[in-house]
Amino acid sequence: MRFKDLTRRLADRPFRGFRIYLSDGSSIPVNDPGMVIVGQSSVVLPTEFGTEEGERFVERWRTVALAHMVQFSDLDEPVASKRRKRKN
């Protein structure tokens, strides 16, 4: 993925939360565009939040190479399960 793909999605107005799918099969939800730091080849994404005195802050984050981002989906779309249902 290119950094412009991500910055365009973060700049959508009105902003709609989305999920970033990674090449290892995991995904990271993005609920707040102001907490994402986009570089030319990698991105810092919040993964865990805390609240103190009514203010939200990032407790944990993950740095991800843009090359490992494979697609976006809206947060209201169901997450695909890796397990397949067996046919009877």
Image (cartoon, rainbow, N blue to C red):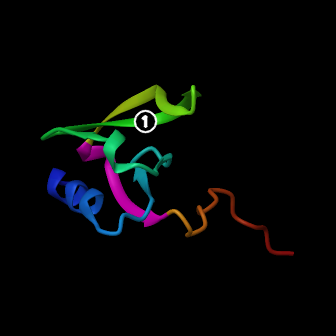
**What are the residue bounds of the magenta stretch?**
66-74
User: Which of the 4 image quadrants contains residue 6?
Assistant: bottom left
Residue 53's x, y, as percent? 57, 26
Residue 13's x, y, as percent? 30, 68
Asked if 75 appears above or below 52 in the picture, the reply is below
The extreme front residue here reads: 53
Name the side, left or right, on which 26 lies relative to 62: right
Residue occupied by mark 1:
46
Q: What element carries label 1?
A: strand
The residue at the point 34 percent across, 50 percent down is: 33
The residue at the point 62 percent across, 56 percent down is: 82
Residue 26's x, y, as percent? 50, 46
Asked if 11 appears above or below 58 in the picture, the reply is below
Quadrant holding the N terminus: bottom left
The residue at the point 44 percent across, 65 percent down is: 73
Q: Which amino acid does label 1 sit on?
A: Pro
Name the side, left or right, on which 22 lies relative to 56: left
Magenta region includes residue 4: no
Task: Report how many numbered discs are placed on residues in the image.
Answer: 1
* Observer-nearest of 57 and 40: 57
